[in-house]
Image (cartoon, rainbow, N blue to C red):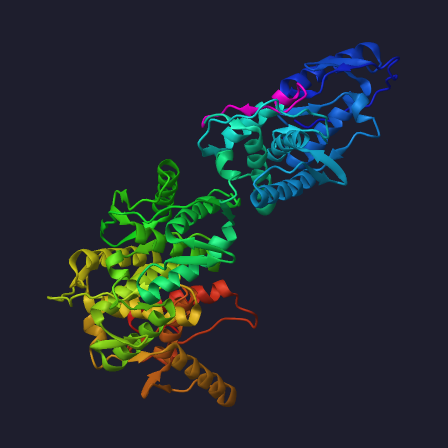
Amino acid sequence: MYQSIILRNYSAPNNPSESLIAGKISFANYFNAIDNIKSYMDTNAQAPNYSWISQGNMSYYNLIFMYAIILDYYNIRGSLPEYVSVNPWSVISNPNTMSFTETQIMEAAETVEYYIEVNHVLPDKVVIGGYNVTMPQFLKLLTTTLHNLNGTYAGQILLGNFGYPTSYSETTTGGILDQDTYLNLARSVEYFMFDGRAPNYQSSTIGNIRYDSLIYMFSQILSSTKQIGKLPDFIVVDPWSKISNSSNTFVSVGNVVLFSSVVKYFIEKRHVLPINVTIFNFTISMPQYLKLLSNCLNYINGNLRSNILLENYSVPIGVSEKINSSLFDEEFYMSLSNNVSSYIMDNGNVPAYMVTNLGNISYQSLIYTFSSILSYYFDTNNLPDVFYFNNWSVISSNNTKFVSINDILAAGKSVADYIEKYHTLPSSVVVNGSTITMAQFLSLAVIGVMNIDNGFSGMIPIKNYGSPTNISEGINQSFGISNNDLIDLASVIAEYMEVNGKAPDYQNSTLGKVGFNSLIYTYSQILRSYQVINQTPSFITIVPWDLISNSSTVFISMEQLKNASTYIQSYVSSYHVLPSSVLVSGVNISMDEFLLLSAKAVTFLKSDLDTSLILERLNTHISNNASENIMKGDIYYDEILEIADYVVSYSNTNKKSSF
């Protein structure tokens, strides 16, 4: 509720005093104090000397300061804080008291994190704003800043004096803490430190975490937050015995992503895993790299940008794979990545394979899959919606050749152009130097369209498929199909070909069976169109193969239609009348037919589709029936689309032009 406040005269307090212990007060506590203060001032027409809160009596000066902090918090965040950090006024008003900003603490966290990863020990101090801050002091600053960033706390971040822990012990062997858990852990540490020293350890759901590990963990969280602007969903905790081991190294998420393309390219070129990969000064084995890949994926998905602890792992034995090629959606491959990371953490080695509901995925395939996904992330800064998985037996075969999306686009144009010129399928098409059958092309085409639709630009292996054995079709008229239905149809075709090892004779649609030949033409049109518009169409018309294969059928390309439009415009400018016809692709086209072609072209382009149109012969237009009642002016884009839709609808009904 927003309500105007009546300003009244109040006298200042007679003798402000305070008896306050530093700490946190809750929303309920500071609101209760508001009621008490208001009641006192309405009764006495005077501000109080102090007001009681859970930390003691807060002075008049400190009350003003605290509520100013609360209102400033509200002004920035649009809500009131759950807790407010309070300190004695004698501390706040002391010119020697040092306060820091959240940004300063996050920058210091980066410094401490880096120092630990290079030297494998805590630094003695960190310099913040020109002040030497000890590690116990820094631990307190970390926990307070963490909750300020989370929006839980409001208040100053003050530098206090805290003693060192009295002993060091740790029982955790490592694990993962989600955001709620690490925030609660930070709160527990902070409350402990109100007694004046840092804890020896703090208990958690994964065991006792020692003082050194707490500083490293909270530094990682704040360093990551500085990079991406939000708290991570989780933090990976490694025991201090591993962090302090000078033989262990740390690798950044950025470097793992950067070199994923190198590993992917090596596999596609040589059909084997590399023995190792060198990331700047570090030579990393493939088992180690699998750990980096799985952790990296989890970190990206969980908004965590900490460096990854690298340990030694051996090559697994008993590698096996039993899975059909399949589409992995993001939920599936992220679950797979999580399971791989958990396996490595629990077992101290990489898996020979991972069991999934789709089958067993081998160690080698895990490396190739995760490298491909991160290579996509490197190119787009996004994780793909889907990944098309192929068995390691395919990837590792020396006979397997990989083609790019651009290779498939070029082949799609070649096939579509051939069909429109010769009214039949070509026997083969050349893709990146490899001559493939139409069955192989259909597989590449549907996978290519799915990958384009999902923004995935990875290489695709050419696989062997049998030709259809009994092609049939059950559609007798053209019909439109949406992008979603096209993608679903592509997925069904890809799955059929993997299971059966051959191209389908047909695929069912809402209007009947779409034959193999029509499927080839439909998806080759999409690929050709994408080369021009760089978008997948929101719909495309599927045309019966009987019409496409009829040698009397005339195809008019968008480019030919543009040239005809230029001719007609020039003709009208010169003679102030429409020509009787226009020559396109060696055929004389009447103005009625040109109008229908133009209207269809507009509807196609509106749907991000650049493809050839089929010439429909129309009844001769009777010029005496033409009429017009318009004024000079501009026609808006939406009106043009409405007119185009009307022309197409009218012509379909009456089989003649509408002007």
Q: Quadrant of residue 81?
A: top right
* Residue farthest top in this picture: 43
Q: Give the percent coordinates (x, y) of residue 65.
A: 77, 26
Looking at the image, residue 492 lies above or below residue 517: above
Q: Is residue 22 left or right of residue 444?
A: right
Looking at the image, residue 296 lies above or below residue 561: above
Residue 434 seen in render? yes
**Residue 155 in magenta stretch:** no
Q: Residue at x 23, y 68 (%)?
A: 440
Q: Give the percent coordinates (x, y) of residue 217.
A: 55, 35
Of the pair 275 and 330, the residue shown nearer to us: 275
Q: Give the percent coordinates (x, y) of residue 574.
A: 51, 90
Q: Is residue 220 left or right of residue 607?
A: right
Magenta extent? 191-206
Of the pair 84 and 244, the residue shown nearer to us: 244
Q: Residue at x 68, y 28 (%)?
A: 2
Image quadrant where one finds the N terminus: top right
The kind of secondary structure the magenta stretch mainly shows is: loop
Q: Is residue 644 left or right of residue 69?
A: left
Figure label count = 0
Residue 376 seen in render? no
Q: Give the percent coordinates (x, y) of residue 218.
A: 58, 35
* Residue farthest left in this picture: 470
Of the pair 608 and 86, the residue shown nearer to us: 86
